[in-house]
Image (cartoon, rainbow, N blue to C red):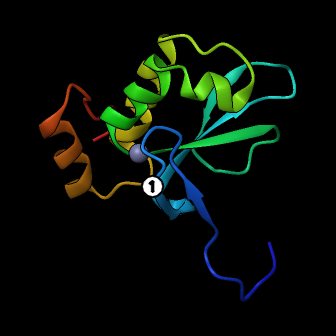
Amino acid sequence: MRRGERTPQRSCVACRQVRSKVDLLRIVRTPGGEVDVDPTGKAAGRGAYVCRDERCAQRAVEQKKLARALGVPVGEELLETIGRNLGCIGLGKRDAERVAGRGRVKPACT
Ligand SMILES: [Zn+2]
């Protein structure tokens, strides 16, 4: 990424809403073929993005949108990992509480 460029825009695989990268959670298919959450947004591999919202994460996994975007099967256990990341990474405390308050996600590190 070159300096001076605007924040890259990506769209959520679940709701297709275009947001700046920082508002999305990156899911990556690693070169080894595993699917993982990429909190830094910099891991090597093919990435797909979902909103930092449990409902979008759920749709992305259950409707196989993530699997399609990444080209590999995505198990529902990934939702747990996403949930942990939603609770604490990239969110201020207030945001984390808001996320926790409207869904099943419990912040893991507050
Ligand atoms: Zn979304």
Looking at the image, which residue sits at the far bottom?
Answer: 4
Q: Which residue is mark 1?
A: 17
Q: Quadrant of residue 66?
A: top right
Q: Confirm or reject: label 1 Cβ below 8 Å from ligand 1.
A: yes
Q: Which residue shows up at 63% across the image and 22% down it? A: 67
In the image, residue 66 above or below residue 86: above
Total marks in image: 1
Q: Looking at the figure, which quarter contains the C terminus?
A: top left
Type of amino acid under label 1: Gln
* Residue nearer the viewer, 66 or 40: 66
User: Is residue 69 found left or right of 54 in the rendered image?
Assistant: right
- The image shows residue 56 at horizontal and vertical percentages of 38, 36
Q: Which residue shows up at 61% across the image and 74% down it? A: 7
User: Is residue 99 found left or right of 24 in the rendered image?
Assistant: left
Secondary structure beneath label 1: loop
Q: Looking at the figure, which quarter contains the N terminus?
A: bottom right
In the image, residue 3 above or below residue 74: below
Judged from the image, the quadrant occupied by ligand 1 is top left
User: Is residue 84 found left or right of 37 in the rendered image?
Assistant: left
Looking at the image, which residue sits at the far left?
Answer: 101
Q: Quadrant of residue 105?
A: top left
- The image shows residue 3 at horizontal and vertical percentages of 76, 84
Q: Which residue shows up at 53% across the image and 40% down it? A: 13
In the image, residue 48 above or below residue 81: below
Q: Which residue shows up at 78% across the image and 38% down it? A: 46
How many C-alpha atoms fall within 10 Å of the one at disc 1: few (<14), some, or many (≥20)?
A: few
- The image shows residue 95 at horizontal and vertical percentages of 25, 54
In the image, residue 11 above or below residue 83: below
